[in-house]
Image (spheres, rainbow, N blue to C red):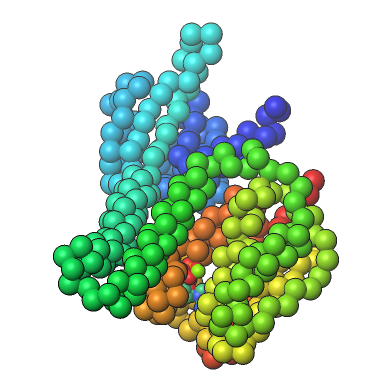
Amino acid sequence: MNDAMLPGILDAMEDGVAAFDLEGTALCLNKKARSLLHAEEDGIRRIDDLPQPVRAFFGGVRSGQSETIELFGQAVRLHYQDMTENGLRIGAVLVLTDLGEQQRAERLRREFTANVSHELKTPLTSISGYAELIETGMAKDGDVRVFAERIRRESNRMLSLITDVITLSELEERAVMEHAETVDLYAIAREATETLKSAAMARGVSVQISGGPTPVRGVRSLLSELVYNLLDNAIRYNRANGTVSVRTADRTLTVRDTGIGIPKRFQSRIFERFFRVDKSRSKTTGGTGLGLAIVKHVCEQHGAAIRLSSAEGIGTEITVTFPENE
Ligand SMILES: Nc1ncnc2c1ncn2[C@@H]1O[C@H](COP(=O)(O)OP(=O)(O)O)[C@@H](O)[C@H]1O
Ligand SMILES: [Mg+2]
């Protein structure tokens, strides 16, 4: 590694880092530090240029100490460390942790757990209800089959939900790209089309595939999941006799449908976990509300860009573009 790479590495960090020499001259401030300190590129040249609460912390602190302060209305933890060379103190390093971000992440995790529990409880309650009707002999002979079918359908719903939750938590492990290989998007799109053929037929939707071999760098199982989820939505939120077209070419996958479309005001939200435009339509067709959250995660892991264009009553087009292979 050479020194020229250092600023890039520091800017990639989630914490703010600022270093000063013994005269109090700033040696470096990474991007997060500048953002937390509300400073421009060259806004902080010396310790004296730091905002007052940070200077106050610097005043009486010893190496290794931390303190949480409020900085421009945000909770920020400051940590101070001497910078040494051959045992001699040559400067000071300040690490700034954005607690707001941490607290937000924790809140999201708590909300997710609560949502999953709630979503699991609904099918489980009806499974238990139908089973009880059969058990107590309340179900007439003709009903038993109907109830068994409902029990199976609700169980499948729970299974899909659990599978999606597992996929999401695997995606958060971050190390998934270790299993990357060269994968043909076209072949994956064909497989997904094949798998969803009967679902499409049941809804009277025709699926066309075009383009040609499209090699990208990625994890096969995750890319299958991505294509499957997009295609599944295009079929699920279509109209009778509608069409879906899938195209792969030039590192790009496009899935277009002639369905109900997504209202403008919801377009930025559909990638959120458990967000559905029409909750009952999603549920009665077996959706989990996690499909696009998975798609978004897979794209992030692969460095792929995702674009959505949709018009209510006309249809939706989603494009995923993979980065150029080095
Ligand atoms: N192709 C599409 N056309 C219309 N609406 C869509 C489409 N894809 C997704 N949506 C909307 O976005 C929501 C979230 O999608 P998703 O995360 O796959 O969850 P699910 O399909 O299980 O409800 C859907 O409930 C639906 O309202
Ligand atoms: Mg879906």
Residue 309 appears in the figure: no
Q: Position of residue 69 (x, y in %)?
A: 28, 41
Left or right, residue 213 beside residue 19: right
Rendering quarter of residue 191:
bottom right
Q: Residue at x 76, y 62 (%)?
A: 186
The x and y percentages for residue 173 are 50, 41
Task: Point out the residue furthest to the front here.
Answer: 141
Give me the residue at 31% from left, 30% from top: 66
Front position in the image: 96 or 103: 103
Q: Is residue 288 above or below residue 93?
A: below
Q: Is residue 215 visible?
A: yes
* Closer to us: 143 or 254: 143
Name the spot of residue 52 as percent of width and height, x first.
32, 43
Front residue of 174/225: it is: 225
Against 71, residue 202 (above or below) is: below
Residue 22 relative to residue 113: left or right: right
Instruction: Using the rendered view, name the quadrant where residue 190 is placed.
Output: bottom right
Count of marks overlaid on the render: 0
Give me the residue at 64% from left, 38% from top. 178
Residue placed most toward the observer, 245 or 325: 245
Task: Indicate the quadrant containing the N terminus: top left, top right, bottom left or bottom right.
Answer: top right
Residue visible at 38% across and 64% down? 152
Q: Residue furthest top?
A: 86
| Residue 253 x %, y % | 71, 66
